[in-house]
Amino acid sequence: MPDTEALIERLTQENHEFKKLHDEHRKYDEELAALNGRGFLSPDQQWRVSELKKLKLIAKDRMEFIIRHTRSTMHA
């Protein structure tokens, strides 16, 4: 079974959907970190934090699905 980090690197280079999801996940994480770095969040910013967490989770779940699928086809 390939190392997960190596597989992620390969998928980032070879799979357009995975690369897009990986980039989106990183972008959401950066925005979330910036918002969490503030002392006070307005209601709109609090809503955005919640939305970013959901978007990150959706992207992560889809990336994990692609990783599992890729691993299963490597063993077939």
Image: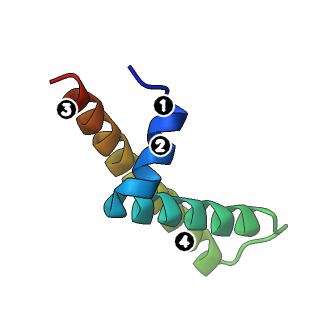
Q: Position of residue 17 (x, y in %)?
A: 33, 62
For the residues labelled 3 and 4, the Cα–Cα distance comes to 39 Å
Q: Residue at x 49, y 26 (%)?
A: 3
| Quadrant for the N terminus in the image | top left
Q: Which residue is mark 3?
A: 73
| Residue 47: image tag | 4
Q: Earlier in the sequence, mark 4 or mark 2?
A: 2
Q: Label 1's element? A: helix
For the residues labelled 3 and 1, the Cα–Cα distance comes to 15 Å
Label 4 Cα neighbours within 10 Å, binned few <14 / some 14-19 / many ≥20 = few
Q: Which residue is mark 1?
A: 4
Q: Are marks 1 and 2 in contact (CB under 8 Å)?
A: yes
Give the residue type that dot 1 points to: Thr
Label 1 Cα neighbours within 10 Å, binned few <14 / some 14-19 / many ≥20 = few
Quadrant of the image occupied by residue 7:
top left
Count of marks placed on residues: 4
Q: Earlier in the sequence, mark 1 or mark 4?
A: 1
Q: Are marks 1 and 4 in contact (CB under 8 Å)?
A: no
Q: Label 2's element? A: helix
Left or right, residue 37 beside residue 69: right
Q: Are marks 4 and 2 in contact (CB under 8 Å)?
A: no
Q: Label 3's element? A: helix
- In the depicted view, which residue is nearer to us: 53 or 12? 12
Q: Earlier in the sequence, mark 3 or mark 1?
A: 1
Q: Position of residue 69 (x, y in %)?
A: 23, 37
Q: Which residue is mark 2?
A: 8
Give the residue type that dot 3 points to: Thr
Give the residue type that dot 4 points to: Trp
Q: Position of residue 61 (x, y in %)?
A: 36, 46
